[in-house]
Image (cartoon, rainbow, N blue to C red):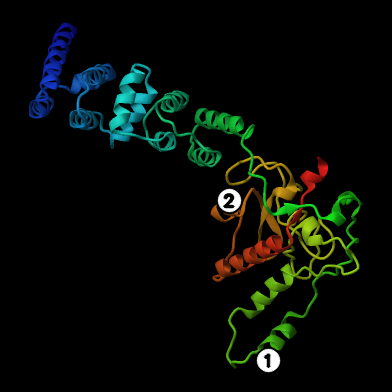
Amino acid sequence: MKLKIFFFKFQMEVLIEKILLDENVERLNYLLENSNFETLFENLNFLSLLLDMCNKIKVKKNFLEIIFNHFIKIQNLQNYLDIEILLCSVAIFKISSIKYVYNFFPWDTYTLLEKYLISKIRGDISLIYSISQKITSEKLTLGGLTSLLQISKNEIDKNFINSLIKEKQEYEQQEYPDWVDVLENEKNLKIESLDENYFNIEPIDEDINELENHVKNMCVFNKEIENLTDIIKISLSSFSNSNKNSNIDPDRIFGPRNAIIENECISGIKGGCRMLSCTCKENEEEWFYNSCDACLKKIRDPSHALRFPLNGGGWIGCYCSLICLVKQPPLNFEDDDENSLEFTELRLDNMQSTIETKKIYDRFKKKK
C-alpha cells in the first residue's frame, strides 16, 4: 500500500510540474478536483514540495490560488491566512518558498499571531514569530503585544509574549512629554518637604443646591438646565483653589484636582484628590509602576504620567499620553449614569486644560 502511494505521489509530482511549466491553469484545476489528493494533502510534506516547485518555476499567482483553495478544502481551513500560519509553524517549509508565497499573499506579524491565537491551528508561537519576522519588515509594538497577550489562552503563548514585552520595555520609552518643565522659583524645590498642610487649601464643602439655584437665577432664558448639579460638581471638584500666599502652584506639583465632594484625599495634600498623589480609588497603595497601562511603554517618572479622572472624584490608571488614556481607559472604570460619557469628557477637558495652561513640574529633570 505504501509503495502504491509513493508511485502515485511521484506520478503526480511529475505531472504537476509539467502542468506548471506549460502554465496550463485549466488542467491543474481539473487534476486537483478529479484526482485522489486527499491522502497527499493531509501530509504537509506534499504541500512543501509543491511550493518549492512553484518557487523554482516562478509560477503566477493564479496557480498558487488553485493549490491553496484545494488545500483549504481538504484541510477544512478558513482562508489563506490559515495556510500562512501553517507555513510559519512547521519547520519543513523552506524560507525561500515562504517568501515566494508572501510576495503574492502578504501578511503582517501581528495579524498572523492574532489569527493563530484565536484559531484551533496547532503550532509553536515562537517559531511562527521567528519565521514571520524573517519574511516581513513589520515590527510588533508594545501596544500590539499587549493586545495579543489579552487573547492568549495557554501559558506557553502567554510566557512567550511576555518575554517579547519585557525585551521591548528595556529600550522602548515614552517620548519626552511636552507638558513638563521646571520654573525658576521651583529650581530649589524639595517636594518631600511639602506636608499635607503646606498649601492650606480647605476641602470642598460648598452648598451644591444653593449654588445651582444661584446659577439658574443668573440665566437669561427661563428654562430648566439639564444636569446642572453634576456640571457644578465637576467644576468645583477640578477648581484649583490655590493658596495665594504661596508661589508654588499645587496644580504643577501634584497635578490637576478631581476632588471627591466633601471628602479629603487619603494620600495627598489637603484640598482634594490630585492626579499625581491620589490613591483613593486604586486597589493598591501605589499607582505608578513605570509603564503605561495601554501601550506598556516605559515611563521615566510619575510627573511624566497621566491618569484617568473618575466621575465621582479621584484618579486611577497610569498612562504615557492622552491618546493612550482615551484609547484604552481603565478596565475598572465604571459609570452607571446615562450621562457618564458627557461628564467624563468634561472632566478630561478640565484635566487637559489645566495641564496645557500650567504644565507639570518635571521631577525627572530636577533629579538629574
- Residue 282 in percent (x, y) is at 71, 52
Looking at the image, residue 146 sits to the left or right of residue 84; the answer is: right
Give the number of the disc on residue 324: 2
Residue at x 60%, y 41% (from the top left corner): 296
Query: 206 or 153: nearer the eye?
Result: 206
Q: Residue 268: name its quadrant.
A: bottom right
Which is more foreground, mark 1 or mark 2?
2
In the picture of the structure, the residue carrying the numbered disc 1 is: 217
Judge whether 287 appears above or below 14 on screen: below
Marker count (numbered)? 2
Residue at x 51%, y 27% (from the top left corner): 156
What amino acid is labelled 2 in the image? Cys
Residue at x 24%, y 17% (from the top left corner): 56
Q: Residue 113: name its quadrant.
A: top left
Give the number of the disc on residue 178: none
Cα gap from disc 1 to disc 2, whole angstroms? 41 Å
Using the rendered image of the protein, determine whether residue 50 is visible from the camera's viewpoint.
yes
Q: Residue 33: name its quadrant.
A: top left
What amino acid is labelled 1 in the image? Asn
Judge whether 44 appears above or below 240 on screen: above
Judge whether 239 appears above or below 209 on screen: above
Looking at the image, residue 153 sits to the left or right of residue 45; the answer is: right
The kind of secondary structure element at disc 1 is: helix
The kind of secondary structure element at disc 2 is: helix
